[in-house]
Image (tube, rainbow, N blue to C red):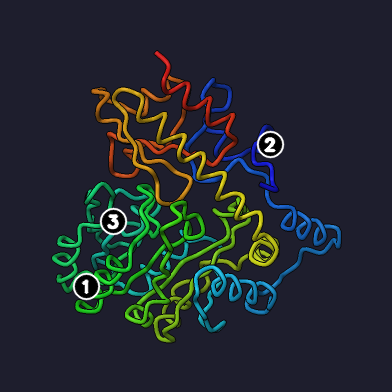
Amino acid sequence: MTYNFDKTPSREGTYSFKWEKYKGRDIIPAWVADTEFRCADPILESLSRRIEDGNLGYVLPGQYQPAIDAVVRWLKDKHNWDIDPLWLVWTPGVVPAFNAACKAYCEPGDKIMVQVPNYPPLLAAPKLNDMQRVAIQTVEVDGRYTLDFEQLAQEASDPACKLLILCNPMNPVGSVLTQSELDQVAEICQRNNVVLCSDEIHCDLVLDEDKVHLPAGRDPKLKNNSVTLMAASKTFNIAGLGASFAIIPDAKLRQHFVKAAAGIVPWVNQLGLLATEAAFTRCDDWHTDQLDYLRENRDLVYERINAIEGLSVKRQEATFLAWVDASGLGVDDVQKWAEQKGVGPSPGVDFGAPQHFRVNFGCSRKMLSEILERLASE
């Protein structure tokens, strides 16, 4: 391994969202989905050069060809997806993007299907846009989590259901949709004239080496019926720079999406564009090494969590987030239980699963070991 992921920068004094929550308390933050790792040097060098130039004025994302070329290159190299640059719509995050999708493809009162459990901003999106949320349950099949396809087919048959928003890889359960599963999604959406908005922000964090990410928009059955959301933010720890993108091959869907976002969703800022460009062109080795490090962290979490009475966790197929089933503890508030141990995970109740919590293992081995030791303490 070329890069040292054991050495992480201090977040003290940075007003980190993740660390501010438990500031002044002896609780290790293991919640929001950013990592503790130092950004790859090419990203930092690119940002430093622009800051040294001294002008941070407007840069229109659609005119910044190096970032566009970087996205085209990355998707071809990592996901075998040849995209037309015209399909690319820049957004300052996937959260405004899937909210824009709600406005673009639905009317107030319509129904939007969302897999549960899911991360809070996605669960909130239908109501924020005056629509109804239909919860599509996650079920366990042969030891892994997947969608309840029988329920999905039933709910999608309702003419009021216009949109399906899903995460792939799934957050928080960490499953990567197989071709068979994606085929079922495509068939159900096509049959019922439902648009798919696929949040794939964790697509470059597949940990199981026998799994491969399948972009929704690459699938011929979904090409003209989908919005695929991606970003360098989770993979390269640049979420604070507010840069992501939607890939929308169908011109009509793209037009509706752009119109829904117009005047509300701001441009991606130029530092976010620069960071994305550097990440997707000069950080391949860093990315590979990070995946190796996260795999070891994932395996440690699996071993140590499952040795704690009352807790269980599956080996995550993707992401740096472990979905812990704490129902065996027999306590009313599993979040309080963890915090009393000195660990601050993401509360399962916020995801729609109050007997669970989510642990972020995108950190140094030392920090992760301390988290696991605290959870195991008497």
The amino acid marked with disc number 2 is Lys
Q: Secondary structure at mark 2?
A: loop
- In what element is the residue under mark 3? strand
Mark 1 / mark 3, whichever is N-terminal: 3
Quarter the C terminus occupies? top left
Judged from the image, the secondary structure of the residue bearing numbered disc 1 is helix
Residue in view at x 17 percent, y 74 percent: 159
Q: In this view of the protein, can residue 120 be seen by the observer? A: no
Q: Is residue 143 left or right of residue 318?
A: left
Q: Which residue is drawn at the image coordinates 63% and 75% (left, top)?
A: 68
- Residue 311: x and y in percent read 32, 29
User: From the viewer's perspective, is 107 left or right of 370?
Assistant: left
Are there few (<14), some (14-19), or many (20+) residues within 10 Å of tag 3?
A: many
Residue picked out by circle 2: 7
**Name of the residue lying farthest toward the top:** 378
> Against 212, is 310 above or below?
above
- What label sits on residue 115 in the rendered view? 3
The residue type indicated by label 3 comes to: Gln
Residue 216 visible (yes or no): yes
**Nearer-the-camera pick, 147 or 116:** 147
Q: Residue at x 54, y 53 (%)?
A: 234
Q: Residue beneath label 1, please?
A: 188
Q: CA gap, disc 1 to disc 3?
A: 14 Å
Mark 2 to mark 1 CA distance (whole Å): 47 Å
- Position of residue 149 measured from the top left corner of the image (x, y, whole percent): 20, 62
Left or right, 106 with respect to 272, comes to left
Q: Picture quarter containing residue 69?
A: bottom right
Front position in the image: 353 or 307: 307
User: Disc 1 residue type?
Assistant: Ile
